[in-house]
Amino acid sequence: MKKGDVLILTPKSEHGKEAISCRGCVVKVKYLQPGKFCVEHYGQAWRWINEFNDEDFDWEYKVTRDNLLDRTEALAMKRAIGHPTDLLGNNMETPKERVERWNFEINN
């Protein structure tokens, strides 16, 4: 982690949920100290978060989260246009392929 990294906070406690609802979950790292770091809610408030086992928040790098969302959006688009995939994006057999497989199994 370095100064300027953008993180996404996930609340773990009631205090965390209240802070997220008031100020949002996207924060920027301002200061680093051993075992903890200070984040800013984009010009609003600052808070210190323990790097390991914080009481109020879990956190992840925004880039990691965005890559996951891109993958999810790509899968949603494939499903929307009728591309047969399961929830993990693996190809599935189409109904036509399934009937052909069944016919092959019955005839052989």
Image: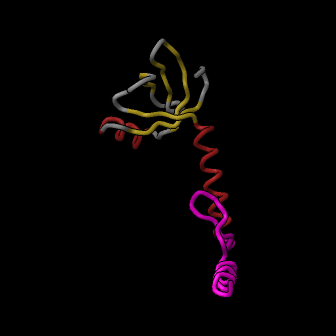
Q: Nearer the viewer, residue 57 or 107?
A: 107
Residue 91 visible in the snapshot: yes
Quadrant showing the C terminus: bottom right
Location of residue 87 (image quadrant): bottom right
Q: Nearer the viewer, residue 42 or 12?
A: 12
Q: Is residue 90 magenta?
A: yes
The spot of residue 44 in percent (x, y) is 48, 31
Quadrant showing the N terminus: top right
In the image, is residue 38 above or below residue 102? above
User: What color scheme is it?
Assistant: secondary structure
Q: Residue at x 53, y 17 (%)?
A: 31
Region rendered in magenta:
80-108
Q: Is residue 60 magenta?
A: no
Total numbered badges shown on the rendered structure: 0
The spot of residue 81 in percent (x, y) is 69, 72
- Could you tell whether 99 is left or right of 61 in the image? right
Residue 48 visible in the snapshot: no
- Could you tell whether 51 is left or right of 55 in the image? right
- Could you tell whether 29 is left or right of 56 in the image? right
Location of residue 18 (image quadrant): top left
Q: Residue at x 69, y 70 (%)?
A: 83
Q: Residue at x 31, y 35 (%)?
A: 15
The spot of residue 62 in percent (x, y) is 58, 37
